[in-house]
Amino acid sequence: MPQSVLVVEDDALIASSLVRALGANGFEARACGTVADAIAALDEQAPDLVLLDLGLPDGEGADVAFHAARDHPTVPVIVLTARDGEIDVVLSLEAGAVDYVTKPFRLAELLARIRSHLRLRDALVANAADRDGVLDLDGLRVDLAARRVTAGGSEIALRPKEFDVLALLVRTSGTVVTREQLIEEVWDENWWGSTKTLDVHINSIRRKLGERAGSPSRITTIRGVGYRLERGAP
Ligand code: CA
């Protein structure tokens, strides 16, 4: 079944070309042009993802992001913004949007972000069902209920945030998780610390998994983007 995207955009030309482009790339897309129609469309049949223009004729796009985050928390919202819309972007991210793309954007970049957020969403939803279960990935065993990790049968002592980072990487193994997604999932939304903290945690996890600096790691660094836990031993 194709994944569905709701395009909220009052510029009819942009809306129709987005719907066409998304359709050509395997998505089922529909468009609406006001805050009221967007909220009605979300409530009537929630899409898999929302693309949200912020300047809408009857209100702020941030209201749509807020509504989606509150009533449809598994639907990622990506904001489409003009270059000068920095304040609006901050407000939308605070309201619950997961990402933003600046207009004019390249279609390839927009599609990549849509797919990345849908993959992360799918992984989180699929694993929410067995949140108390045990994840097992090639000898790396993560017990979510007991918050214990073993590798090849030996217990690995992780600090709480290290456990959360590793559990998320195992849940989404084989796909890239962006730095922003990791920080948003593991640290709370009010976290204003340096993103260096994330690298420190990753390096500590690597060490505790018995990996030496410079040798192959199960956790691949995608420079400037994020991390991917590889399936299969390095
Ligand atoms: Ca607009």
Image (tube, rainbow, N blue to C red):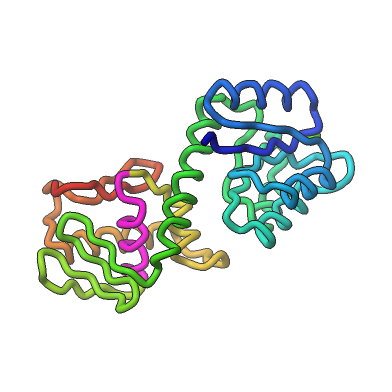
Image height of 172 relative to 24, above or below: below
Q: Position of residue 98 (x, y in %)?
A: 58, 50
Whether 162 is among the magenta residues is yes
* 148 within the magenta span: no
Q: Residue at x 68, y 54 (%)?
A: 68
Left or right placement of residue 164 versus residue 104 in this view:
left
Q: Is residue 14 above or below residue 226?
A: above
Identify which residue is drawn at 26% across, 46% down: 220
Residue drawn at (25%, 51%) of the image: 219
Whole-percent x and y of residue 167?
33, 63
- The residue under the point 47% across, 66% down is 187
Which residue appears farthest toward the front when viewing the image? 1
Pinpoint residue 145: horizontal percent, then vertical percent.
34, 76
Res 133 → quadrant: bottom left
Q: Is residue 117 left or right of residue 93?
A: left
Judged from this view, the residue extending furthest toward the right is 58
Magenta residues, start to end: 161-174
